[in-house]
Amino acid sequence: MLKDHDSAAIVAVGDMHRARQFYGEVLGLEVLSEMTEDVVTYRTGNTRLTVYRSPDSAGTNRANAVVWGVGKDLDAIVSTLRERGTRFLHYPDLPGLTLEGDVHRAGSRKLVWFADPDGNILHLNDL
């Protein structure tokens, strides 16, 4: 039923000004549309990421909110994010993972986690 349809991510934030700075300037996403001043949709590859103001639910999800498969660009993206002040999350106790700097390894795969200003967990991998 849904296998031939695109999906998109949606993330709740508490402060739209701070979110616009993070998603637009730190992550470098392009605004596709602004439904209201409290709802912004960004282009990310062939998909969309909607960020909306919801102070009561912002950052309450403790799982990955958004995942990007960035392929061989992972190391360069991590370096740029670090230069822009991003602090990475480390999970040294996850079985099967090793940590090298800010990059986790699972065999030959590379994985990175970080959070937006509201604590929404964002994930990059080298797929």
Image (tube, rainbow, N blue to C red):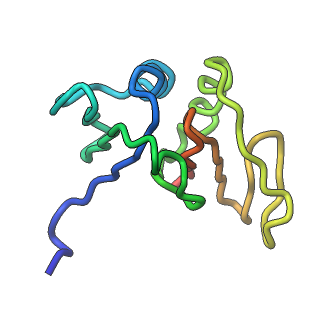
- 104 lies above or below 26: below
Q: Residue at x 82, y 40 (%)?
A: 101
Image side of residue 17 versus residue 89, left or right: left
Residue 95, image x and y in percent? 80, 72
**Nearer-the-camera pick, 117 or 84:** 117
- 116 lies above or below 123: above
Q: Residue at x 79, y 71 (%)?
A: 96
Q: Quadrant of the N terminus?
A: bottom left
Residue 5, image x and y in percent? 16, 65
Image side of residue 8 versus residue 82, left or right: left
Image side of residue 57 versus residue 85, left or right: left
**Nearer-the-camera pick, 76 or 61:** 61
**Nearer-the-camera pick, 38 or 8:** 38
Residue 102, image x and y in percent? 76, 41
> Count the marks: how many?
0
Q: Given the current orientation, which residue lies at the most extreme front position?
A: 56
Q: Given the current orientation, which residue lies at the most extreme bottom position?
A: 1
Q: Residue at x 51, y 22 (%)?
A: 26
Is residue 56 in view? yes
Is residue 124 in view? no
Q: Residue at x 29, y 25 (%)?
A: 30
Residue 58, image x and y in percent? 48, 45
